[in-house]
């Protein structure tokens, strides 16, 4: 991960559901297509636990319409935190941390953090963009993701 320019963004939202329900849905990347607009599909090579590998296919642009990243679950604490990181074989670094905390019986705080290599933007668009622009877009996307996640969880 050395010599990478990382974009970091974090968002929080309250969801009106029990912590175990929220964690089971949010921590599992195979549900990401329901709340992250660029995700085509994410598959796990086993059950949701420490060490599971995720193949994430995302539509980053017309140029990178089915981009593949492989992520490994590097930290897992049931009903609290799941952290995923790209493997050493991936051309772009990405770290995703999904944390939940019970606020009350039926209210859960969701904290979603992403760190990613800005070089993926050049890969997707064919041009580099200033870090500030990428950071603003990532923060905007984070808000949209969390609103969509809340909507998905509260409708069931």
Image: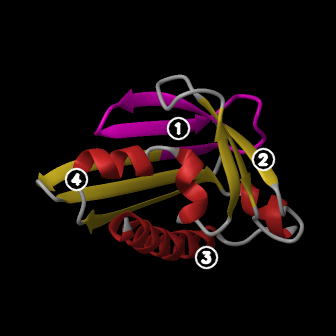
Quadrant of res 82:
top left
Q: Which residue is mark 2?
A: 68
Query: Mark 2, residues whose alpha carbon is within 10 Å: few (<14), some, or many (≥20)?
Result: some
Q: Are marks 3 and 4 in contact (CB under 8 Å)?
A: no
Marks 2/4: CA–CA distance? 32 Å
Q: Residue at x 66, y 41 (%)?
A: 43
Q: Judging from the image, what secondary structure is the residue with disc 4 in? A: loop
Q: Nearer the viewer, mark 3 or mark 1?
A: 1
Question: If you read the primary sequence from the N terminus, does the residue marked by circle 1 or circle 4 appear first?
Answer: 4
Q: Position of residue 128 (x, y in %)?
A: 78, 68
Residues at marks 1 and 4 touching, judged by CB atoms closer than 8 Å: no
Q: Which residues are magenta?
A: 71-96
Q: Position of residue 105 (x, y in %)?
A: 11, 54
Of 117 and 153, the residue lying toward us: 153
Q: Secondary structure at mark 1?
A: strand
Nearest to N terminus: mark 3 or mark 1 = 1
Residue 85 vertical placement versus 6 (above, below): above
Quick one: label 3, few (<14), some, or many (20+) residues within 10 Å? few
Distance Cα–Cα, label 3 vs label 4 = 36 Å
Q: Quadrant of residue 15?
A: bottom left
């Amino acid at each position: 991960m050395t010599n990478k320019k990382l974009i970091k963004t974090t968002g929080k939202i309250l969801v009106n559901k029990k912590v175990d329900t929220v964690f089971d849905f949010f921590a599992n990347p195979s549900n990401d297509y329901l709340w992250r607009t660029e995700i085509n599909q994410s598959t796990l090579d086993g059950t949701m636990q420490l060490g599971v590998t995720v193949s994430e296919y995302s539509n980053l642009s017309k140029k990178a319409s089915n981009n593949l990243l492989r992520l490994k679950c590097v930290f897992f604490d049931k009903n609290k935190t799941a952290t995923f990181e790209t493997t050493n074989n991936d051309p772009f670094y990405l770290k995703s941390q999904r944390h939940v905390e019970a606020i009350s019986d039926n209210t859960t705080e969701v904290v979603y953090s992403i760190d990613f290599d800005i070089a993926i933007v050049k890969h997707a668009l064919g041009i580099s963009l200033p870090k500030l622009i990428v950071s603003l877009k990532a923060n905007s996307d984070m808000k949209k993701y969390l609103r969509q996640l809340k909507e998905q969880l509260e409708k069931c």
